[in-house]
Image (tube, rainbow, N blue to C red):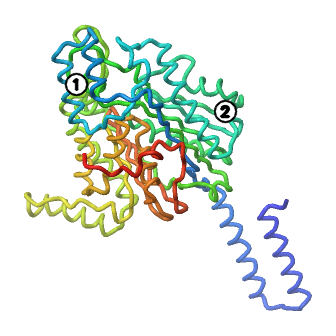
Amino acid sequence: MLSKPTCFAFIIVAFEALFILQQWRNPIFHFLLLSYFFFAIRTYFLKSKQPRPVYLVDFSCYKPPSKCKVPFSSFIHHASMIEAFDAESVEFMAKTLVSSGLSQETYLPPALHCIPPKTHHRESINEAHMVLFPVMDDLLSKTKLSPHDIDILIVNCSGFCPSPSLSSIIINKYSMKSDIKRYNLSGMGCSAGTIGVDLAQNLLKTHENKTAIVLSTEILSTGWYSGHEKPKLILNCVFRMGGAGILLSNKEQAESTSKYKLIHSIRTQRAYDDTAYYAVYREEDSRGILGVTFNKDLLQAVSETLRSHITLLGSQILPFTEQLFHVISILRKKLIDKSAEIYTPSFKTVVQHFCLPSSGKPLIREVAKGLNLNGSDIEPALMTLHRFGNQSSSSWWYELGYMEGKGRVKKGDKIWVLGLGTGIKCCSLVLECLRHIVEDDRKSPWSCCIQQYPIQV
């Protein structure tokens, strides 16, 4: 097949021959024809240098089996039978559960249903198999791909980093090809799911005609805390089972089969600041027991991180008028009226749907306050927290699944996926819906309960 520049050249030669045969000697015809030729060639080569768009073809979310459900009564009863917890610790966890925004139908892995909980390496491996394999199977089935069609594999899990890695476990299970590019992300906190997609996008920008899969989960059996320090007990109460798989591609044919196009991706972090760095911190307690501490400065650190992050994102996606009003309000506060409020730009002028961190009700409401979002905007995050708990890096895809299940995502809509994790770091993805989505997936974790929502939490 001839390349486009070669075709252009043949067309120009044909027209020149026609002009000569017709004895069109006016030089203007030759000048216009040659000008068009050079313009077309220049446009072609400029376009060829630009990376192809990255499409989010589809995604899949894990629904744990019913046997893994953990009602409040069962959780508290089991906790009271574990010798590592004293009465004060059990009472604190009971109060945290009641105020958490979680329902009675969230899930914990089988290892944490044991008394005492099993937190050995083998149990963590089993949990990884339990979550990641069904997600991978469902994603390949949805997209009608085989494991050999995958060119890039990214697996993220913050707290569990085995050797061989989780990505090696997937490659071994599915006998994937030998030249697959694979990456394993750990220690990135809840933002790892969006960071994994950002990494995949950057790889797809430099590798043409490729397909990538991002798998996101958190292994809970390795993060269970069996001590008395209250800031570390929070993780036991709100983190629950979950996992997601996202398939991305830059292939030309992906445009017609994909749900979304990835149009923006931005990352910022504040690990240089001690307050942000220690806001969520994994460390040993006074008795040498490892756990994750949620410090009282967390919401303040989140607010400061979000402020700089949304300023950067806003500069790229907000209309000029919204940016102008924001700048004018800052200048007014600095130069004229110190008591004046700074205008918060409305992201709803360009974004129709929001996937927010579902780490807890206080955090969701703090983010909503900073972005001037209303109840319907934060509904997917609150309902995901209620039905499935805090699923760390995979929560956003359950939120997107909720919106699809409700039939709210339409062609042309923009979705802002806001990842927030330890460090503190932020990663935002902005997706554009390519077709009206009516989700009728019986394997979706929302399929059997979507009609019950929304509810008051």
Residue that badge 1 annotates: 93
Q: Residue furthest right?
A: 21
Q: Is residue 393 above or below residue 162?
A: below
Q: Quick check: 287 left or right of 414?
A: left
Residue that badge 2 annotates: 180
The amino acid marked with disc number 2 is Ile
- Residue at the spot 42% in from the left edge and 30% down from the top edge: 241
Numbered mark located on residue 116 in the image: none
Q: Earlier in the sequence, mark 1 or mark 2?
A: 1
Q: Quick check: 30 left or right of 205?
A: right
The N terminus lies in which quarter of the figure? bottom right
Q: Quadrant of residue 228?
A: top left
Determine whether the residue tagged by mark 1 lies in a helix, strand or loop: helix
- Residue at the spot 41% in from the left edge and 44% down from the top edge: 396
Pick whichever, 253 or 34, lies toward us.
253
In the rendering, at what x and y percent does residue 308 appear? 29, 48
Q: Quadrant of residue 53?
A: bottom right
Determine whether the residue tagged by mark 2 lies in a helix, strand or loop: loop
Query: Mark 1 to mark 2: distance in Å?
Result: 44 Å
The amino acid marked with disc number 1 is Met
